[in-house]
Structure formats: C-alpha cells, structure tokens
Image: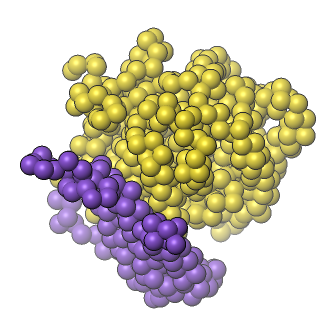
Chain colours: A yellow, B purple
Amino acid sequence: MNASHLPILQVIVPLMAAPVVILLRRPNAAWALATLVTWTAFAISLALMAQVLNEGAFVYPIGGWAAPWGIEYRLDRVGALLLVIISGIGSVVMPYAKSSVEKEIPRDRVYLFYTMYLLCLTGLLGIAITGDVFNLFVFLEISSLSSYVLIALGRDRRALTAAYRYLIMGTIGATFYIIGVGLMYMATGTLNMADLATLMPSVIDQRTALAGLAFLTVGISLKLALFPLHLWLPNAYTYAPSVVTAFLAATATKVAIYMLIRIIFTVFGATHILEVLPFVQNILMVFALAGIFAASAVAMFQDNIKRMLAYSSIAQVGFIILGISMLSTLGLTGGIIHLFNHALTKCALFLAIGCVAYRVGGTRIGDMQGLGRRMPWTMAAFVVGGLSLVGVPMTVGFVSKWYLVLAALDKGLWPVAGLIVIGSLLTLIYIWRVIEAAYFQQATEDAPVVTEAPLSMLIPLWITVAASVYFGIDASRTLDIAFDASETLMRGALP
Amino acid sequence: MEYFTGLFNYWVVIVLMMMGFYVVIAQHNLVKKIVGLNIFQVSVFLFYISMGKVKGGTAPILGEGIEIYSNPLPHVLILTAIVVGVATTALGLALTVRIHNAFGTIEEDEINALEDDESAPAILVEPEIDEEAIR
C-alpha cells in the first residue's frame, strides 16, 4: 500500500465497505467487517496524524488534478485531531455495539444498521479531511442522511419523530450552508478553501461575501446545536439506539464545530472577520453562555438520563463555542481541547447508560436506584465520566475548563470566567442526581434482578473512561496539538 | 426598474426561498413540510443556475463560432445538490410513512399530544423478524 494515498483511503475504505455489508447480510459478519473497517480507519488516521506532526500540513490532490480545478484534501493539525477522534470513538464503540445492537435492533435490520454506521463514518471523516467547501457539503449530507436513519432505528416510536425533526432542521442547516457557499462562489469564483482564503480579503467589502458568511454561520450553528438552534438534539439523542447516541454525541456535533472553525479561521481567516465585526463575536459568546445555563438548567429536571445527558451536550457545545468566540490563541486552544475531551467524556457516559439500558431496559432516574451495588463497574465508570464532565482535577474535563477560564482571564473577561465556573458547577447538580439514585437509594421491591453488563460492553466503556483520565493527567500531547493548531488558525494563515 | 428586471431571477429565488421556508415552519402536516422543504431547496438550485449564466452565452462546448459560454461549474454542482435533495425527500417521506404506522396520524399537533401521553405504549408492536433476509 502506498502511504501517500492514505488521505483518500481514509474516506474510501468505509465508503466501499458499506455496500459490502449489505451483501453480507448476516448480523455477525456485518459486525465483523464494520469493526475491521473502523479499526483500519483508526490506524490510517493515526498514521496521518503522525505525518502531520512530523512534516506539517499537507495537500492531497484527488486523481492528481491540481487545485483549484480539482478537489484536494488538505490536512492540518485540527483536521488530523478530528480524524483521530471520529475513528477512535468508532473503534471503541464497535466492539460494544455487538451486544447492544443485538438487544435493541431487530435481527433482520442489523446489517442495515452497520451499513448506515459506515456511511456516517465516511461522511464525518470526509468533512474533517476535505479542502473544498462543496465537497464538504456532500460529506455533510452523507453523514446527516445516514444519521437520520440511525436515529430512526430506535425502538421507541418517538425515535421516528425525532429523526423526522432532525431531518427537517438538518436539511435547513445544510441548505443554508450551500446558499453561503454559492454566495462565496459568486464573490470569488472558487470553491477551494485555500483559494477562498487568499481571495476573500479583496471581496470582503462586498455584501455578497458577508451575506455568505451569515448563511454559513447560521447553517452550521444549526448542525452543531448552538443554543437556540438546538431543538432537534434532545429527542434525537434520547430515542436513538444506545450505540448511535454514544457515537453521534461524541462525533457529529464536534465535526460541525470543526466546520465552523474552518469557515471562520481558514476561509475568512485572512480577513479577521470577527475582529472587524465584533458583534458576530459577541452574538456567539452570548448564545454560548445562554446555552450553558439554559441547557444545564433544563438538564437538572430531566427524568430520563439520556435526555439529561443530551441537554448537557448542548451546554458543553456552549463551552466550546465560548472558547472559539474569545478569538485568542488561548481561547481557541481551550475550545479545541474541550472538543476532544468532551467527545471522550460524553462517549463514556452514553456507553455507561447504554449498559444500564441493556440490563435494566430503561434509562429513567427511577431505573438507576440501587444500581451502584448491582452494576458496580458500569456505575463506577459513570461516576468517573460524570466527574470529568464537571471538570474535577485529574480528568480531561478539568484541563479544558482550566484553559477556558485562563483564556477568559487573559482577555480580562472576569464575569465570563466566573460564569464558566458556575456553569461547571451546575453540571455537578445533575450528575449528582444519578449518583444519589445509584448509590444512596435502595432498589424498589419489584425492580428486576440485574447483573453486571457483559465484558464486551464493559471493556470499551472502561477504555473511554481510562482515556479521559489518562489525558487528564498527561495532557501535554493533546494540548501541544491544540495549541499549535490554534496558533496557526489565529494567524489566519493557510494550514 | 433595472433593480427589478435586471435581478429578476434573484427576486424569484428569494420569493421561492421564503415561501418554502414559511411552509416548513408554519405547516403542521408532515408531508406539506417536506413539500415546503423541496421548494426551499429548489430556490437554491435556481440561485446557482442563475449565477452561472452568462448573457448571450451558450453551452460550454468546443465548436465553430462559440466564444461566450456559461459557467458550467454551478450547473454541475446543482446536479449533485438535486441528488441530495431527492435522497432527503425520499427519506423524509419514508419516515412519514413509518410515523403514520406508529401514530396513526401525520398531523404534528396530534403527534405531539400522543407523545406527551405517557400512558400510551411507546413501542407498539415488536416487528417480525424476516429470517430469509439475513440468510
């Protein structure tokens, strides 16, 4: 295998495997191939990450056609980090999926589930690696359409309406995105990100380019569930199958945030648009803070733990956007590192809840009573994940919150720093409700007798938990990548 | 006057876009929402096609006497977007059929009432497993 073709293999391997899974049909064979492909994708993304770290950002023209006529893949540190997150989360979730999917999805649809999962993986990886704004739209739609199907596979009939609402909102977001791309193309005559970045300063005074930026920002904000455009998210995460929730919560919104970073800091980077238009920056910051508090407040009153964690995701997206909106290297570092850390943490939490759903059959707070004794490993993982979500030292959550507070102080935004700390403490309240139910309440008399989840589910769960502790203690590697990435992005320079 | 006639295509785009968007938001019928979504998307297709048109230009082919031609790239992009739009519509309608089977209605307010009703079973019937399909 020629190593220089790794960028295209990253995308093409899962894409080609998807139809093969349909031909295989048998649930076990489908699972085996999907797992193998995901692990291959993970290996490729690690190789690409190593290449980026050693040789710096690089360009891969597809079919040898040079940009701006051909489509090129362009990989820098943020992109490579995203690839590692997506394929890494996929690799952890896949072994877990076998038991969970057998339980939650009818046997004759399992192969279709894995097909959709592979397509979703293709789309998400493609978004992270492409250097062409229209190509990005195509990947966005591949990942979105497959994730609507994945969500609709949930057992509850409300999964169907959740998927439908996500489809409507997601399509509006994606359509806004192409309107924005169209306006940028009108102004510059190119679709290549690097080309756009060089041409943008000369056309930024035109209303066309500004209108394009507005459409892009709103469209992408819908996709990343920035408050108040988050309405599709809670039901979608609540009623989707456990595996789907864990995978999408850790990757889908993160990839949309990456899109926003790419548009603001790469395509519009040389124009320093957010500094020229400070109100855009302020709007992002206000919505981010409003999202942190509104979503945390709603999360506290949720009866269903999956829905509670879904609202928590909206709050955490708020933290990431807050970091980005500070427009400083430190703030962007905080945002990027929180993107990585939150993916790990939220994946661990949803996997733990998936274990509970597997054994107990429900995810309501009443189902958690006394589980601390009956499913000790699962609940211990939930506690560590929860602590990381709160931002307790020695976990990844602490590292990112620390950087966000530092960034706020660095900018002289004392109130914002205070709000970040208060927002994190709100997390403690809703995580504590689960801990209290699991450890300090007795199971009701008629509660079903449950045992610990199978090892095939516990091991992936503990891998994510261990990773969220490991990167909390030794954060230097991820921090270096995030810092270098944000320094390049802040300069507005090309990757 | 030039403001209206010269930019006629773009006015049509805006009108269609707002009509489609309004239908998506205001209609409570799930099929009508998809119709609105389609109008919304079609307006974007028209937008791209208008953008690529050069006045007096022909198709971009090599030939005698052809000097001015329209920009083919937006047209090609829109072919892709049309395919995406068809896929979205198909998926949306498929979901609507499933919703109709599960709830017995495709009116959003009635569905909301059924969803809030905690006493109703969330999972109606376990689907039959088609063993032939996975052999």
Residue A92 vertical placement versus A66 (above, below) = below
Q: Quadrant of the C terminus of chain B?
A: bottom left
Which residue shows up at 39% across the image and 46% down it? A134
Residue in the image at 42% along x and 78% along y: B35
| Residue depicted at 68% across the width and 42% down the height | A321
Does any portion of residue A9 appear in the rendered image? no
Q: Position of residue A273 (x, y in %)?
A: 65, 38
**Residue at horizontal 13 percent and vertical 50 percent from the top:** B65
Q: Tell me: residue A439, above or below residue A478.
A: below
Can residue A60 be spotted in the picture? yes
Residue A288 point in image, percent of width and height: 73, 48
Q: Is residue A335 left or right of residue B122?
A: right
| Along the viewing direction, whichever of B119 and A326 lies nearer the viewer | A326
* Farthest-out residue, top: A54
Quadrant in which residue B9 is drawn: bottom left
B106 on left or right of A60? right
| Image vertical order of residue A121 relative to residue B12, above or below | above
**Residue A75 placed where, x, y %?**
43, 27
Count the labels in the image.
Answer: 0
Give x and y (percent) for residue B37.
45, 72
A216, A126: nearer the viewer: A216
**Pick the front one: A85 or A368:** A85
